[in-house]
Image (cartoon, helix red, strand yellow):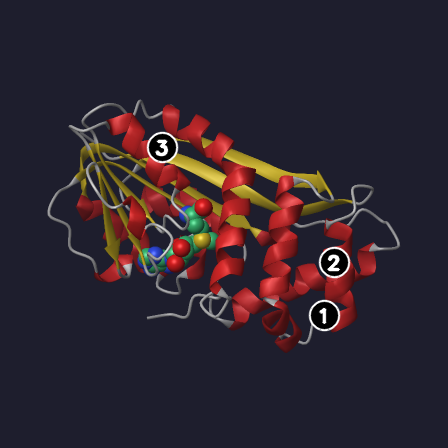
């Protein structure tokens, strides 16, 4: 099983980071999920629910006649949610066997972390019903940009370190950009693609996520040799400073459908 980069992050800090992700991105994800028409009675699968906000939203939407399975390598933040219509499973999605097939599968910021990503999308297909929807939301860290500010020197080094960390692990820092082709190759029909550049000021929701993730991944970024401690401190200070603007990365969200 491939290493997940936040595995060694302290529990309370990781929960804080996951809640920041939810605060920054849930509104967009929910708006996107609404487009599938998810409704009462549907069976849904959430891969990597993290702290569980989308899992809970899906549970409210499908109601008691429905089912929402959440599978995560680490379920400690969602175990308390277990109970109809939510079912929590601890484990790697790649090894999982489910007792039902699903009308909708969602995952956000999960596939990029999996070296077996070439196999993940074909593995997803057999767990879906004919005509089912898949909603994938993954980042592209290669789209981070500099804005010609003197402070950008450190920012640029950290952006390079983020990409290098992924490539050194055999992962693709631009993974989100590969989603449409991978889904089409696996037999899905793309129905919607939204690419969002996270151009934001310091202390904005996305900047808070990046500051927290940079603290968590400090040693991993240093190991790449692309950024030093001073760069990381400056990146975090910028991300907390409302006067500083940055293009942090992009998120590519895709809705695709299996033929009926
Ligand atoms: C960056 S977090 C995102 C959490 C949540 N999807 C969100 O966006 O709020 C990634 C989550 O995916 C889980 N994860 C990563 N790879 C996984 C795999 N192969 N199978 C199951 N869970 C996985 C991690 O444990 C973590 O909870």
Cβ of mark 2 under 8 Å from ligand 1: the answer is no
- Residue at the (77%, 55%) spot, across then down: 237
Quadrant of image for the C terminus = top left
Give coordinates of residue 89: x percent, y percent.
Answer: 23, 54
- Marks 2 and 1: CB-CB under 8 Å? yes
Residue hosting label 3: 57
Cα separation, mark 2 vs mark 1, equals 10 Å
Q: Secondary structure at mark 1?
A: loop
Residue 206 is drawn in which quadrant? top right
- Label 1 or label 3, whichever lies nearer to me, is 3
Q: Could you say which disc has been placed on residue 235 in the image?
A: 2
- Label 2 or label 3, whichever lies nearer to me, is 3
Which of the marked residues, 1 or 3, is nearer the chain's N terminus? 3
Which of the marked residues, 2 or 3, is nearer the chain's N terminus? 3
Crowding near pointer 2: few (<14 within 10 Å), some, many (20+)? many
Quadrant of ligand 1: it is: bottom left
> Please, is residue 154 above or below residue 226 in the view?
above
Cα separation, mark 2 vs mark 3, equals 33 Å
Quadrant of image for the N terminus = bottom left
Q: Is residue 254 left or right of residue 25?
A: left
Q: Secondary structure at mark 2?
A: helix
Which of the marked residues, 2 or 1, is nearer the chain's N terminus? 1
């Amino acid at each position: 099983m491939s290493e997940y980069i936040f595995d060694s992050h302290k529990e309370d800090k990781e929960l804080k980071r996951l809640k920041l992700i939810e605060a920054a991105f849930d509104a967009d994800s929910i708006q996107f999920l609404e487009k599938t028409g998810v409704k009462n009675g549907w069976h849904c699968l959430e891969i990597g629910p993290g702290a569980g906000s989308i899992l809970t939203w899906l549970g409210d939407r499908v109601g008691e006649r429905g089912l929402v399975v959440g599978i995560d390598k680490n379920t400690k933040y969602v175990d308390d949610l277990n109970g109809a219509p939510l079912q929590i499973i601890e484990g790697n999605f790649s090894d999982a066997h489910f007792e039902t097939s699903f009308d909708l599968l969602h995952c956000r910021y999960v596939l990029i972390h999996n070296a077996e990503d070439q196999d993940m999308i074909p593995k997803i297909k057999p767990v879906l019903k004919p005509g089912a929807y898949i909603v994938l939301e993954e980042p592209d860290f290669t789209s981070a940009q500099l804005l010609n500010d003197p402070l950008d020197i450190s920012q640029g080094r950290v952006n390079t370190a983020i990409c290098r960390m992924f490539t050194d692990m055999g992962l693709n820092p631009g993974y989100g950009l590969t989603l449409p082709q991978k889904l089409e190759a696996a037999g899905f029909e793309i129905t919607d693609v939204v690419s969002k550049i996270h151009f934001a000021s310091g202390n904005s929701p996305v900047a808070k996520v990046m500051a927290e993730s940079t603290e968590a991944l400090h040693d991993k970024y240093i190991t790449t040799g692309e950024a030093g401690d001073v760069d990381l401190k400056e990146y975090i200070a910028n991300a907390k400073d409302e006067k500083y603007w940055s293009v942090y990365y992009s998120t590519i969200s895709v809705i695709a459908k299996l033929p009926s």
